Amino acid sequence: MKALVKQKAEPGLWLMDVPEPEYGPTDVLIKVLRTGICGTDLHIRA
């Protein structure tokens, strides 16, 4: 699955393929179709 990942304490986010998380019998996995990023989130980014 795809994820925006913050790898280092420097500007930038990386779009990466990451493994699907494991979940148990009392957990749920939700498929997110759309999301957004607030400009403040990008400004803080460290």
Image (cartoon, rainbow, N blue to C red):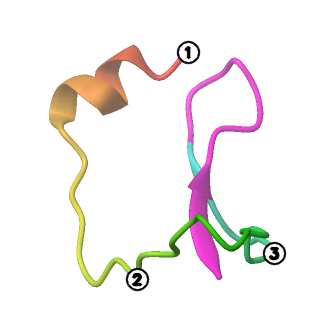
In the rendered structure, find residue 19 and report the number of the disc placed on it: 3
* Badge 1 amino acid: Ala
Q: Which residue is mark 1?
A: 46
- Residue 9 on image: x %, y %: 70, 18
Q: Residue 2 appears in which quarter of the rendering?
A: bottom right
**Label pair 3/1, CB-CB below 8 angstroms:** no
Q: Which residue is mark 2?
A: 31
- Residue 20 on image: x %, y %: 74, 77
Q: Secondary structure at mark 1?
A: loop
Q: Is residue 19 above or below residue 36?
A: below
Does the magenta portion include 40?
Answer: no
The residue positioned 24% from the left and 65% from the top of the image is: 35
The residue positioned 23% from the left and 76% from the top of the image is: 34
- Residue 13 on image: x %, y %: 56, 46
**Toward the viewer: 8 or 26?**
26
Taking 13 as reference, is 44 left or right? left
